[in-house]
Image: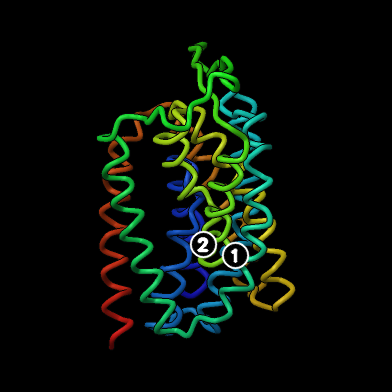
Amino acid sequence: MEYLILIFIGLFAAAVGSLVGIGGGVIIVPLLVFFGIDNDIISNVTPQSAVGTSSVVLIFIGLTAMMSYGRSNQLDRKNGILFLFGIIPGALAGSYLSDVFTTESFKLYFGIFLIFLSILLIIRDRIKPMNIFQDERYVRPHVDHMGNVYHYGFPPYIAVIASFIAGLTAGLFGIGGGAIMTPMMLMLFRMPASIAIGTSMLIVFFGALSSGTGHLLQNNVNFLHVAFLVPSAFVGAKIGVYLNQKFNSDTVIIALRTVLLLLGLYMIIESFL
């Protein structure tokens, strides 16, 4: 039963994460906590091992989805590389900061974080993209996989600061950084959804690689869990990219934000019990 649940977690998290550009860590971590710490169905789970294991799994999810989106021209490579100057050191720093969590404090703060993400998903389509960070000196044309041309550009230092913040959350909570960067790219940097989601998977890959390295050095990775999560995540990521190119993801986003809200409330309540 334990191994079947791990396979399901990897498949489901990777499919949803690749579909909407969040990586899947926001699903992997709370499910590992739920089945491991709360119900003792999955063995040897701690907050740190859940975060570390999720980070390593996200390396494979991010790589698979990044390559698929790259082939379909849904990835802004130039700005994506710029984001790496913030995401890599941020994720590495966050991986070491995660060691301060107890089980109760991790549930509380991760629950608050999940509710924050659900709110971001609610408002991201209701708030018009902001022009405050657009700078004519950096505006360039970008063509998506449908041949549509978009114009946007922003100062490099803004991109590095934003991605560093996303990196900290990636290392702290094992989420890869895409859950924070995707709304930022949509609302602050005016990137179209199709390109933002693909670029987010590049960020997830390198963010997870950095935070995963930090957690590996701290022995926070359960390799048995990784062995079952990675193959199913590889298949799930392929499914997510395929669905993204075939269907409107609005329905999935609505369902995802509801699930994140409920998971967040559950973890906050559990932190006080």
Q: Amino acid at mark 2?
A: Ile
Quadrant of residue 249 within the rendered picture: top left
Left or right for 236, reference 93: left
Considering the numbered disc 1 on the image, is that residue within a helix, a strand or a loop? helix
| Disc 1 to disc 2, C-alpha distance | 6 Å
Q: Which residue in the structure is indicated by mark 2?
A: 7
Q: Is residue 46 above or below residue 133?
A: below
Snapshot quadrant of residue 30 = bottom left
Question: SS class of the residue under badge 2?
Answer: helix
In the rendered image, residue 233, in percent from the top left (x then y), is placed at 56, 53
Disc 1 residue crowd, few under 14, some 14–19, many 20+, Cα 10 Å: many
Does 118 appear above or below 272?
Answer: above
At label 2, counting other C-alpha atoms closer than 10 Å, the crowd grade (few under 14, some 14-19, many 20 or more) is many
Q: Which sits in the foreground, 270 or 89? A: 89
Residue at screen point 27% across, 59% down = 261
Q: Position of residue 191 (x, y in %)?
A: 47, 28
Q: Say above or below: 94 vs 270.
A: above
Q: Amino acid at mark 1?
A: Phe
